[in-house]
């Protein structure tokens, strides 16, 4: 075991320095205002949950969980996602008081990294959950608000790729006759490894039916064309999905940012209906994802509909246009003789909207370096400058 140096952090953990923290705070505040004005109420769940409930139900690989044991001997996990804990709270209490229920969150999640690769083990998600509504309009609302939130946060160019978990899972399960092959193809789709599917099809004798579906879906065929060619995949749920797509096409401001892709498969296995991923220009990672997860709440008791989405704040910040600081950062130097005067001046400048730092001048060892952090400097030790 190597020696841990004093300045080292656990694998995947990051420090949030002042400038980034300020950007996150501004983003969070804007998002909270948007979500609240659209009828959603904020909720906070514990960072620690029981492994037997949230850990097992979250559908993430167990190797991704941070585990620890409390003093009662119970296995705990740091929450690996937010949808599952919110489903727990809603099922236990909130849905008995209000149904349908609209909840929002801005919280961190924890997912263990097995090796260093620049990927964070702790990151913040912004999201919405609409619980207790099974209608196509609930799915359309979530998609509409996902697009609206991204625009509200200042992202000009993004794409929301929409698929249906029930449709692709039914295609895999009914058109591939081997369970191991089903798992392999599902993994390829999660990774978007279409070359892997091509190679699998070339090597697997019984792949022709699913591979025909895959090629047609990948060619840009419409849902109607796909279901016409493969009528066994048509269900009540896929009919509802087509209603969701039709509702989006009626809104000109949304039509251009949505695209339908029947091959979307989420790494979160609890999705059962409409599922989508969010991509932004300039990012190599999805900005977020969401969808319908009706069966998740049933694991906590009530059989009610549920749909929602989450956005990764760190990925979003990487591609948002840089914001110009609008407030003046003002430094006031002071000493014993000018202490009272400096306090008065600071209040006057703050009243004018400036960000004022009061600094004992004798404590600054490298003034040239220190002063680079400010737009304006007043030195009361020798009069205004």
Image (cartoon, rainbow, N blue to C red):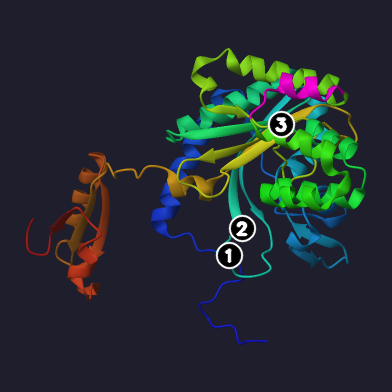
Majority SS type along the magenta span: helix
Kindly indicate whether the residue at mark 3 contacts the one at mark 2 (C-beta within 8 angstroms): no
The numbered dot on residue 87 is none
- Where is the N terminus found, in terms of image quarters? bottom right
For residue 341, what is the image quadrant?
Answer: bottom left
Q: Secondary structure at mark 2?
A: strand
Residue drawn where x is 61% and y is 87% of the image? 3
The numbered dot on residue 13 is 1
* Residue 12 on image: x %, y %: 60, 65
Q: Is residue 176 above or below residue 115?
A: above
For residue 244, what is the image quadrant?
Answer: top right
Q: Earlier in the sequence, mark 1 or mark 2?
A: 1
- Where is the C terminus found, in terms of image quarters? bottom left
Mark 2 highlights which residue? Answer: 122
- 210 or 36, which is in the foreground? 210
* Residue 124 on image: x %, y %: 58, 49
Alpha carbon separation for disc pair 1 and 2:
6 Å
Alpha carbon separation for disc pair 2 and 3:
39 Å
Alpha carbon separation for disc pair 3 and 1:
42 Å
Residue 247 located left or right of residue 58: left
The residues colored magenta run: 220-231
Q: Earlier in the sequence, mark 2 or mark 3?
A: 2
The numbered dot on residue 216 is 3
Residue 119 located left or right of residue 49: left
Kindly indicate whether the residue at mark 2 contacts the one at mark 1 (C-beta within 8 angstroms): yes
Q: Report the number of numbered marks.
A: 3
Residue drawn where x is 59% and y is 28% of the image? 259
């Amino acid at each position: 075991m190597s020696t841990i140096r004093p300045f080292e952090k656990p694998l995947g953990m990051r420090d949030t320095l002042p400038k980034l923290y300020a950007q996150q705070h501004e983003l969070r505040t804007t998002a909270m205002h948007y979500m609240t004005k659209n009828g959603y109420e904020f909720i906070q769940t514990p960072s620690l949950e029981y492994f037997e409930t949230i850990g097992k139900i979250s559908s993430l690989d167990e190797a991704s969980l941070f585990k620890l044991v409390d003093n009662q001997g119970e296995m705990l996990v740091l929450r690996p996602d937010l949808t599952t804990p919110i489903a727990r709270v809603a099922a236990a209490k909130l849905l008995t008081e209000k149904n349908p229920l609209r909840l929002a969150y801005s919280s961190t999640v924890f997912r263990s990294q097995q090796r260093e690769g620049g990927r964070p083990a702790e990151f913040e998600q912004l999201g919405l959950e609409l619980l207790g509504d099974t209608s196509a309009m609930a799915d359309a609302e979530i998609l509409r608000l996902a697009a609206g939130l991204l625009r509200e946060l200042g992202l000009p160019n993004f794409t929301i790729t929409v698929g249906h978990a029930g449709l692709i899972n039914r295609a895999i399960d009914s058109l591939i006759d081997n369970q191991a092959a089903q798992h392999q193809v599902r993994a390829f789709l999660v990774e978007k490894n279409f070359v892997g599917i091509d190679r699998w099809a070339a090597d697997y004798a019984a792949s022709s039916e699913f591979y025909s579906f895959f090629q047609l879906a990948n060619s840009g065929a419409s849902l109607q064309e796909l279901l016409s060619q493969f009528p066994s995949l048509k269900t009540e749920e896929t009919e509802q999905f087509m209603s969701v797509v039709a509702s989006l096409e009626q809104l000109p401001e949304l039509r251009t940012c949505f695209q339908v892709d029947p091959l979307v498969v989420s790494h979160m296995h609890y999705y059962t209906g409409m599922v989508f991923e969010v991509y932004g220009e300039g990012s190599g990672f999805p900005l977020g994802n969401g969808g319908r997860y009706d069966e998740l709440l049933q694991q906590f008791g009530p059989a009610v509909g549920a749909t929602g989405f989450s956005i990764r704040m760190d990925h979003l910040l990487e591609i948002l246009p840089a914001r110009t600081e609008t407030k003046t950062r003002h430094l006031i130097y002071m000493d014993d003789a000018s202490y009272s005067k400096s306090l008065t001046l600071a209040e006057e400048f703050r009243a004018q909207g400036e960000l004022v730092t009061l600094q004992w001048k004798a404590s600054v060892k490298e003034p040239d370096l220190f002063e680079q952090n400010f737009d304006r400097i007043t030195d009361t030790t020798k009069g205004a400058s």
